[in-house]
Amino acid sequence: MTDFQIFASELPYPDLKIYSVSRGDVLALTDDYAGRDSETTAIMQYAYQSYILKEKYPDLALVLEKIAVVEMKHHELLAEAIVQSGGDPLIAGRHCFWSGSAVNYSQKVCDVLKADLAGELGAIENYRRTVASLSNKSIIALIERIILDEEIHVRIFEKLIEEFSCE
């Protein structure tokens, strides 16, 4: 298996400078933070997958753990942005509390990798929609920086799908 060294962009995350934020900005962040297709889901999904694949695929399990750590950083940064914007970082999206039913519980390696690739592509799409709806330039810069990490994750999963001959 390829020895992955980079799981996040080497660029620093921008400092948040939040002076005034619309309620819409806070709501836009909540779905990325803890909605169905969110950082919360990604963390739980990668953790689950690393546990179930560890015995048979220890190197892959480690890759999933390292990606989960990056997603935890995103989770923390989004929570900070929500708090600084006057919001409450509940583990919930706009419409409901987060649930473990959002996690993909596939156990076959190719199904896992395909689900993870789809999740990362979906995260990028969701983040781009969020950026388009935001008014605060500091939060926009944060989301754009997070997208760089998600793009690295896409490349990792594409390479893994190739290595495991998943079609």
Image: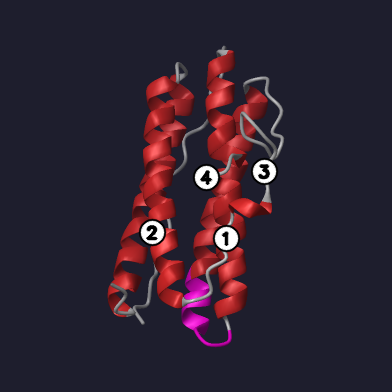
- Provide residue 78's location: percent of width, then percent of height: 57, 36
Tell me the quarter of the image containing the N terminus.
Answer: bottom left
Q: In the picture, residue 76 is in which quadrant?
A: top right
Tag 3 secondary structure: loop
> As drawn, is 65 to the left or to the right of 132?
right
Residue denoted by label 1: 45
Give the number of the disc on residue 98.
Answer: 3
In this orientation, which residue lies closer to the viewer: 24 or 94? Answer: 94
The span picked out in magenta is 55-63
- How much space separates mark 1 and mark 3, taking CA atoms? 13 Å
Q: In the picture, residue 85 is in which quadrant?
A: top right
- How much space separates mark 3 and mark 2, taking CA atoms? 21 Å
Mark with earlier residue (3, 4) = 4
Tag 1 secondary structure: helix
Residue denoted by label 4: 37
Mark with earlier residue (1, 3) = 1
- Whether residue 72 is visible here, answered yes or no, is no
- How much space separates mark 2 and mark 1, taking CA atoms? 12 Å
Name the magenta segment's main secondary structure.
helix
Residue found at the far bottom of this picture: 56
Mark with earlier residue (4, 2) = 4
Residue 37 against residue 67 in the figure, above or below: above
Residue at image x 62%, y 74%?
A: 51
- Whether residue 59 is visible here, answered yes or no, is yes
Residue 81 against residue 73 in the figure, above or below: above
Residue at image x 36%, y 65%?
A: 157
- Provide residue 6's location: percent of width, then percent of height: 39, 63
Circle 4 residues within 10 Å: few <14, some 14–19, many ≥20: many
